[in-house]
Amino acid sequence: MSAGFSAWLNSPTGPKTTHFWGPVANWGFVVAGLADTKKPAEKISGGMQTALCIYSGLFMRFAWMVQPRNYILLACHAANESVQSYNLFRWADHNYSLSGMVPKTDKA
C-alpha cells in the first residue's frame, strides 16, 4: 500500500470515519434530484425542494466550519443545492409562470 493511500485511509476524514461515509450516503439526494429532473414539473413538490435547498445550504456551511474541514460533504451539498435549485425553479416556473395564463383568442 502506498504511503499516500495509507495516510488518506487513516486520516480524520478517511473511510474509517463518519466524515467519509456520511457524505457518501448523502450523494443519494443528488442522484434522486437528478432523477427528478426527468419528471414533469407538476409532479415536483415545491415545499420539499425548498426544504432540500435550505438543508444543503446549512450543511455546506457546516462542512466548511467543522474541523477538519469536510470537503467531501461540501461538494455533495453544493451539487445537491444545484440540482434541487434547478428543480425548484422548474416547479416555480410551472406554477407561477404568466406564460400559461395568457388567454387564447379564437378567430374562426
Image: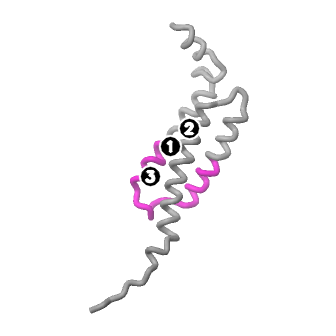
Q: Quadrant of residue 71?
A: top right
Front residue of this view, candidates 68 and 29: 68
Residue at image point 44% right, 64% down: 42
> Magenta stretch?
30-55
Question: Which residue in the structure is indicated by mark 1?
Answer: 30
The quarter of the picture where residue 65 lies is top right
Q: Position of residue 61 (x, y in %)?
A: 69, 41
Specify whether 53 is left or right of 37.
right
> Secondary structure beneath disc 1?
helix
Give how far across and how far down residue 37 sits, in percent. Answer: 43, 52
**Residue under numbered circle 2:** 76
Residue for badge 3: 36
The chosen color scheme is one colour
Q: Main secondary structure of the magenta part?
A: helix
- Give amino acid for label 2: Cys
Q: Earlier in the sequence, mark 3 or mark 1?
A: 1
Q: Mark 3: which secondary structure?
A: helix
Marks 1 & 2, CB-CB < 8 Å contact? yes
Image point (61%, 54%), residue name:
51
Instruction: Name the amino acid type tagged 1.
Output: Val
Category of crowding for the residue at label 1, using alpha-carbon neighbours closer than 10 angstroms: few (below 14), some (14–19), many (at least 20):
many
